[in-house]
Image (spheres, helix red, strand yellow):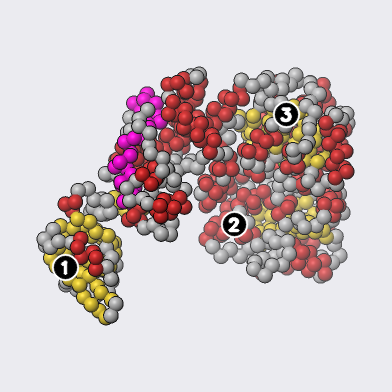
């Protein structure tokens, strides 16, 4: 290892307590933080334009000899310093207001570089001016702000681009050569990577394009390599662990399949084989089940749960909302009762007495399956013997919660289900510690949902369409962005909509209202009535977004659809198209932004969750889309998780090679090893 880097940024010349504090706002506290604080952009100031060819308002970099230095007093308290430089073709003034002290920095006859925006006023020979140009003397050695490609950093108030650039330059000059090279030698040789020092310089102050590209490639690789090591390490930590070995209780499962009202699709059969194989192994299962909305994940979960219960373990199923938990409960309870299993529902809104009763039952193994929400991992809950945990709709849960729940048992198997179609390579990163199963086929007999985008004007014709369908026995969802009227937000509220529609248009029909402010009891009743066909139109907020399953509901109207994200719209739409009837999704929207318009056209163009996810990614960018932090992974500073696909795959392969090569990491590559430990602590 090399000499240790000094810890605090205060060791850098020019950084006192005040700047230390400001840097802190940028999350920079150590010298290393600083060196890894990369530019958000660059500006090419490496080319000097001839002064006779410049145009008003242009951003330019010029080089010339100082002809004249003089100061003008305009009026009291206002002085202008003018410095004229010339390259022989013409001359240009640099001007500064009330900065007399700069006079000393210039010397007649010496060469300087100016960089800045030409004024678009006062034009003509000898009147070309740059206000407040960035300037440097040419002879003073290497230039930092001009005469090169310069870095542009994200700033915080109180620190200027120039100041940060100077601090960075100093830090690089003094310390870049002390940064440990994290990558093993053999990788540096194999991929002909530049060393760390060269790479850090290349990202901050690239000599040329080649320098930058090589530097970026190396640092992006390093970042993704670390990330992969981290997730593979997590995965490996589990393989030594003894988990639950499910014996494959064929009889019970066969019975279960018999009582199912349908045959499994080919895709369902395939993923079931994968899951069953995992569950039979002594190593704890860590599997992600991905399948578009409506692809039939629930039944697969149920089969896995039957498998664990038949092996005399308890099963746990966690959903992100109470409505969804209730629904799973209602659906699974009768099926499982026939097989002799006891199912309970445990949510946050249980009465205390009821909760205590359940708690006892769970502890004494009088229930086999516990379905619930986050309430499932409350501290005081003791389980008897957990064999399998199923988490539905993973995108709402963080890794942390995943681990917390696992702590409740003795390394139970884990099945996580998500409807977010993540490109495979990306899944390798975000869920690198998990294996992936994909249901890529919808159950038969589904007709694609017809989606249209309408404006307010079409409302009455939409309503007559709805009436026609209700008269034929169908049911309808109307989704509103708000619960109640709001003064700040102009959008349709569920309560208001319910009132209006009950009063006139749909007064002869049965309407229901659902949102998060009504009581648990009311909500249960409403959902039950809707499921049983006692409600024709369910007016609701996005509480119905995930998982609600009423096949007879074939129309969904989404009010102010421009207010919803793509993923959300797709989830909502997934509530219809679940039965044998042609289904419709009507988006009522008046988008004000290009992005909003784009979202709506994507929705009308495709029904394919994968395409929608890709469009969403494109519109929103990966950071926001996946919430990388939420997955318990460090932020990426250089690599782009989507665009650097090839680097990602290489990094994955190399990381696998190193992890499998047991034990050498710690002894042979101590820097790398320590870095990983640090990262694991930080996330
Ligand atoms: P999701 O993947 O969105 O959770 P669900 O598991 O809720 O989807 O399934 C959607 C609907 O499809 C449910 O009504 C379910 O009973 C039905 N379903 C699931 N698998 C099949 C199948 N193989 N054949 C017919 N219908 C199925
Ligand atoms: Mg589901």
Residue closest to the eye, 331 or 505? 331
- Figure quadrant of the N terminus: top left
Residue 409: mark: 3
Q: Is residue 186 magenta?
A: yes
In three-dimensional space, the C-alpha distance between marks 1 and 2, rounded to whole angstroms, equals: 60 Å
Q: Decide if residue 528 is on the left or right side of residue 434.
A: right
**Residue at figure coordinates x 88%, y 38% from the top left:** 357
Q: Decide if residue 157 is on the left or right side of residue 381.
A: left
In three-dimensional space, the C-alpha distance between marks 3 and 2, rounded to whole angstroms, equals: 45 Å
- Residue denoted by label 1: 69
Q: Is mark 2 within 8 Å of ligand 1?
A: no
**Residue at figure coordinates x 85%, y 62% from the top left:** 509
Task: Indicate the quadrant where residue 465 lies.
Answer: bottom right
Q: Is residue 664 magenta?
A: no
Q: Residues within 10 Å of mark 2 (few under 14, many from 20)?
A: many
- Residue denoted by label 2: 600
Q: Where 450 sits versus 326, above or below?
A: below
Q: Residues within 10 Å of mark 1 (few under 14, many from 20)?
A: some
Indicate which label's residue lies in the foreground, 3 or 2.
3
Q: Is mark 3 within 8 Å of ligand 2?
A: no
Residue 628 image position (x, y, % from top left): 55, 42
Say whether residue 74 is visible. Answer: yes
Stretch of the chain drawn in magenta: 165-190
Say whether residue 443 is visible. Answer: no
Q: Which residue is situated farthest in the bottom direction here?
A: 75
- Evaluate if marks 3 and 2 touch, with contact meaning CB atoms under 8 Å apart: no
Residue closest to the eye, 153 or 575? 153
């Amino acid at each position: 290892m090399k000499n240790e880097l000094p810890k605090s940024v205060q060791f850098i010349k020019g950084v006192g307590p005040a700047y230390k504090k400001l840097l802190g706002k940028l999350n920079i506290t150590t010298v290393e933080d600083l060196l890894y604080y990369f530019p958000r952009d660059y500006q090419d100031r490496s080319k000097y334009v001839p002064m006779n060819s410049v145009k008003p308002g242009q951003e330019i970099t010029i080089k010339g000899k100082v002809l004249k230095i003089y100061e003008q007093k305009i009026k009291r308290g206002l002085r202008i310093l003018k410095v004229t430089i010339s390259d022989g073709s013409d001359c240009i003034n640099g001007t500064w207001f009330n900065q007399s002290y700069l006079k000393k920095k210039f010397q007649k006859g010496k060469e300087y570089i100016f960089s800045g925006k030409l004024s678009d006023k006062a034009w003509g020979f000898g009147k070309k001016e740059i206000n407040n140009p960035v300037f440097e003397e040419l002879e003073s050695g290497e230039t930092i702000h001009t005469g090169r490609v310069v870095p542009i950093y994200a700033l915080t108030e109180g620190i200027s681009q120039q100041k940060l650039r100077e601090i960075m330059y100093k830090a690089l000059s003094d310390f870049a050569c002390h940064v440990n090279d994290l990558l093993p030698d053999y990788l540096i040789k194999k991929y002909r990577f530049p060393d760390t020092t060269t790479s850090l310089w290349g990202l901050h102050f690239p000599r040329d394009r080649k320098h930058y590209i090589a530097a970026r490639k190396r640092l992006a690789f390093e970042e993704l390599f670390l990330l992969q090591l981290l997730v593979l390490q997590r995965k490996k930590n589990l393989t030594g662990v003894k988990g639950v070995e499910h014996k494959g209780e064929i009889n019970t499962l066969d019975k279960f399949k018999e009582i199912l009202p349908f045959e499994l699709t080919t895709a369902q059969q395939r993923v079931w084989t994968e899951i069953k194989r995992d569950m039979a192994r002594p190593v704890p299962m860590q599997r992600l089940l991905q399948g578009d909305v409506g692809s039939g994940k629930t039944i697969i979960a149920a089969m896995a749960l039957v498998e664990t219960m038949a092996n005399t373990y308890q099963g746990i199923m966690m959903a992100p909302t109470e409505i969804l938990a209730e629904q799973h409960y209602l659906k699974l309870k009768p099926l499982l009762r026939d097989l002799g299993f006891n199912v309970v529902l445990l949510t946050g809104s249980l009465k205390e007495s009821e909760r205590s009763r359940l708690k006892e039952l769970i502890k004494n193994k009088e229930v086999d399956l516990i379905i619930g929400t986050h309430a499932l991992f409350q501290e005081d809950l003791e389980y008897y013997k957990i064999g399998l945990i199923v988490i539905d709709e993973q995108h709402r849960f963080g890794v942390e919660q995943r681990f917390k729940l696992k702590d409740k048992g003795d390394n139970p198997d884990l099945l996580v289900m998500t409807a977010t179609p993540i490109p495979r390579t990306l899944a390798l990163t975000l869920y690198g510690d998990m294996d992936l199963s994909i249901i890529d086929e919808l159950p038969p007999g589904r007709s694609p949902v017809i989606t249209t985008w309408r404006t307010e004007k079409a409302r009455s014709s939409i309503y007559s369409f709805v009436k026609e369908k209700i008269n034929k026995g169908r049911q309808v969802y109307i989704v509103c962005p708000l619960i109640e009227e709001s003064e700040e937000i102009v959008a349709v509220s569920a309560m208001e909509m319910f009132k209006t529609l009950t009063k006139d248009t749909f007064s002869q029909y049965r309407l229901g209202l659902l949102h998060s402010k009504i009581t648990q009891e009311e909500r249960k009743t409403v959902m039950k009535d809707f499921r049983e066909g006692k409600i024709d139109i369910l007016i609701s907020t996005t509480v119905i977004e995930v998982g609600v399953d009423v096949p007879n509901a074939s129309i969904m109207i989404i009010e102010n659809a421009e207010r919803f994200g793509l993923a959300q719209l797709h989830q909502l739409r997934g509530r219809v198209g679940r039965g044998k009837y042609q289904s419709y999704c009507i988006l009522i929207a008046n988008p004000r932004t290009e992005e909003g318009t784009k979202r709506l056209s994507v929705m009308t163009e495709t029904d394919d969750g994968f395409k929608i996810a890709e469009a969403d990614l494109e519109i929103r960018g990966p950071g926001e889309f996946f919430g990388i932090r939420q997955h318990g992974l460090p932020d990426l500073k250089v690599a782009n998780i989507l665009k650097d696909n090839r680097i990602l795959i290489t990094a994955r392969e190399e990381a696998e090679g190193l992890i499998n090569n047991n034990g050498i990491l710690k002894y042979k590559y101590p820097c790398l090893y320590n870095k990983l430990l640090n990262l694991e602590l930080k996330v």
